[in-house]
Amino acid sequence: MCLAIPACVEQLMAEDSAIVNLGGVRKEVSLALVEDIALGDYVIVHVGYALQKLDPVEAERTLAMFAEMSVITDFPDTSSE
């Protein structure tokens, strides 16, 4: 199974790459597979490559669902009880 994550482009760099924000983590990714990317755009990222540009509303909705899933799966640590 593959998981591609929406990320916001924060900095454009030379040679088809950019710094994106993945939930607070900044990472350099390749833009070689996408065109016309600008600062503030959202892209779908998988294994270091931006695969496509994503509508900002859809990106925010997807990120909100990921955040909700994180809350649901964060169970209290009962190992010391």
Image (cartoon, grey):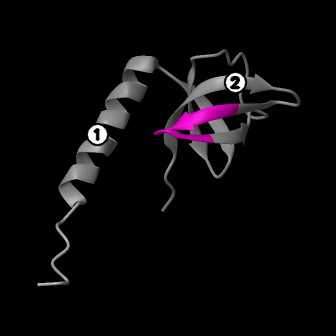
Percent across and percent down for residue 64 are: 30, 34
Image position of 67 with respect to 47: above or below? above
Residue 62 in the magenta stretch? The answer is no
Q: Nearer the viewer, mark 1 or mark 2?
A: 2
Q: CA distance from mark 1 to mark 2?
A: 25 Å
Residue at the location (57% across, 19% down)? Answer: 41
Q: Main secondary structure of the magenta part?
A: strand
Residue at the location (32% across, 29% down)? Answer: 61
Q: Is residue 64 left or right of residue 33?
A: left
Residue at the location (18% across, 65% down)? Answer: 75
Q: Amino acid at mark 2?
A: Gln
Judging from the image, what secondary structure is the residue with disc 1 in?
helix
Circle 1 crowding by C-alpha within 10 Å: few under 14, some 14–19, many from 20 = few
Q: Where is the C terminus found, in terms of image quarters? A: bottom left
Task: Please identify the quarter of the rendering in which residue 44 is found.
Answer: top right
Residue situated furthest left in the rendering: 81
Residue situated furthest front in the rendering: 80
Percent across and percent down for residue 49 are: 69, 43
Span of residues in magenta: 19-26
Closer-to-camera residue (28/41): 28
Mark 1 sits on what residue? 65
Percent across and percent down for residue 2 are: 51, 57
Q: Amino acid at mark 1?
A: Met
Closer-to-camera residue (64/74): 74
Residue at the location (74% across, 23% down)? Answer: 12
Residue 24 in the magenta stretch? The answer is yes
Judging from the image, what secondary structure is the residue with disc 2 in?
strand
Disc ID at residue 11: 2
Residue situated furthest right in the rendering: 15
Percent across and percent down for residue 7 are: 53, 34
Circle 2 crowding by C-alpha within 10 Å: few under 14, some 14–19, many from 20 = some
